[in-house]
Amino acid sequence: MSASGHREIDHTADLGFEVWAESLSSLFAEAVLALGDLCYDRAVVRPVGQRRLEIRGANPEERLVRWLQEVYLVLESELWLTATATNVVVEDEAIEGTLHGEPFDRARHTLHSEIKAITYHGLEIVQRDGSWRVTVVVDV
Amino acid sequence: MRVPGRIFASERLIRDIESDKSIEQVANVAYLPGIVEASLAMPDIHWGYGFPIGGVAATDPAAGGVISPGGVGYDINCGVRILRTELREEDIEGRVPGLMDALFSAVPTGLGSSNAIKPLSVAEMHDLLVTGAEYVVRDLGMGGEDDLRHTEENGRLAGADPDQVSDRAVERGRRQLGTLGSGNHFLEIGVADRIFDVGSAAALGVDEGTVCVLIHCGSRGLGYQVCDDYLSVMNRAVIKYGIELPDRQLCCAPIESDEGRAYLGAMACAANYAWANRQTITHLARECFMETLDIGPRDLGMRLIYDVCHNVAKFEEHEVDGRLRTLCVHRKGATRAFPPGDPRIPESLRAIGQPVLVPGDMGRCSYVLTGAPGALQRTFGSTCHGAGRVMSRAQAKRESRGRDLFGEMAERGVTVRAASKRTVAEEMPYAYKDVTEVVDVMAGAGVSDKVFRLKPVGVIKG
């Protein structure tokens, strides 16, 4: 298994994904990719534009939920698709990072399901043997 | 557990129910402060966030009863409406693909769907959040007073307080009025193919062969945002009020508290947005039918039979231990089902009972029921809301690989239009329980009676 990655998981009525990475910052960046793969065909999204995000949260789980909520809102409200996330810095109460992507183009992009929420269901960021992991369930 | 858990099911359905953790969730709900009589579950129950989907719980405000956003769900006032028409099945023969194209173009669907109508200003949004479907009928001129009379609560839930709705939620709502969304939401043309109660069906303007339109959607991003916002508030409230819960997803606050009142005020706004949304889509659907078939409103006769919400908490009077009490009835994936004669249903429908709309999967059938006397005795006037999933979305997608899903649906006689092929894969009929078994359980329990069945001929998915 590579140092960082993600995969979709089974979850009755909803959808979810498991994410792993070598650092907390990489975990947050990788989670953006997982969310993107759930919502659209990310492989063809070109990282030509940028969006800077900053959020605050009391603990790592809350920061992850809010981070993904912000990424999703950029998608829903602006129809702006994220290809990758870089320069992700996770601090004690805040997180910031840069999204790279482009506006939705009907001719090239395929959208999948809308998401109602990033949930806290079973959400626990675990660090073990130099690897960080988390499972995120989204309500669709 | 403060009260027992009670699940309505057949032997076969209970086996499906046992396959996820929803029974444990029924038990967890029974711990809520102020819960009355029992934590109930309908036969279409499946796992949900905190509360199971298909759960009903009544709490007593006078006995420290709580309100829980997880008992309402993310999609506040997700619901269904059904419209009947003067059209017969033969009138739309060969016209369904054209109708579906027109509807698919007029009603934005799928991720990011917006701008069905001109975006609303913040001031207009505040009016809409208080007046609900009334705003669409009276201010936007879409639909008539008859539509309001045939909507639960007349399409306007009391107690709405826009000041309790975040700016972000309002912003998300400004451009999404008249849009369907995705997931299990749909717009469907169906034909009544089986009548179980001829008298009641006639009272609803339906007989065998009547063309109907079903609309299933909710409060869109505004409702999701309200739920998200208040889950944070309620997580803090649980600590503040020392409420002990087996699952933090049941987070809640006493109804008689600042947090409880704030959520209820915001929830009513979201409920009103959902009714306004379904009313707007109704107007767009009427226009599509008239233009495509080149007929006028009289020949179309697209009249609202009824509109029900199946994700909401409402204050209702119910008799408990021989005493009439005002309770906060949480229905999450459950439908109100008041029996004949109940003064809370419109006069024109009082003789037959409140219509209940239970959509099945997009390939099999849907049902129109009416509430029966057993509902007030056994379920706080509630019944089922749909088929309920039996297969995860990821599993349904795997099942669908390499198959021509649109072709399979066409073979069943159903024209499908969809914003996302993946959503169609997730929503295929085999991913759901058979809705007939679900409605039969509730008929057997004397809670709701079958009036007619609807077979789909055209479906729009998000």
Image (cartoon, grey):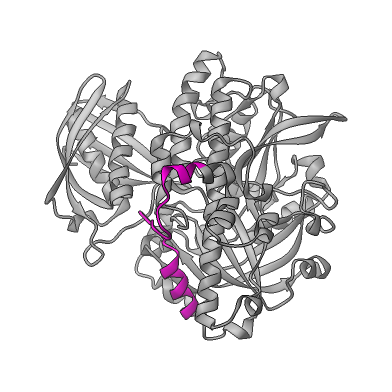
Q: Residue B335: where, in percent of width, then height?
A: 66, 48
Based on the picture, tell me whether residue B98 belongs to the magenta stretch: yes
Based on the picture, tell me whether residue A19 belongs to the magenta stretch: no
Q: Which residue is drawn at 67% across and 58% down?
A: B145
Q: Residue B173: where, in percent of width, then height?
A: 43, 46
Q: Nearer the viewer, residue A46 or B10?
A: A46
Q: Residue at x 63, y 81 (%)?
A: B89
Residue B51 appears in view = no
Q: Which residue is drawn at 72% across and 31% down?
A: B327
B350 left or right of B129 in image: right
Residue B404 appears in view = yes
Up/down of A125 relative to A101, above or below: above
Which quarter of the rendered picture does the C terminus of chain B lie within? bottom left
Q: Residue B399: where, in percent of width, then height?
A: 41, 62
Q: Residue B90: where, in percent of width, then height?
A: 62, 85
Q: Which residue is drawn at 58% across and 26% down?
A: B261
Q: Quadrant of residue A64?
A: top left
B442 left or right of B126 in image: right
Which quarter of the rendered picture does the N terminus of chain B lie within? top right
B135 left or right of B37 in image: left
Numbered range of the magenta stretch: B97-126
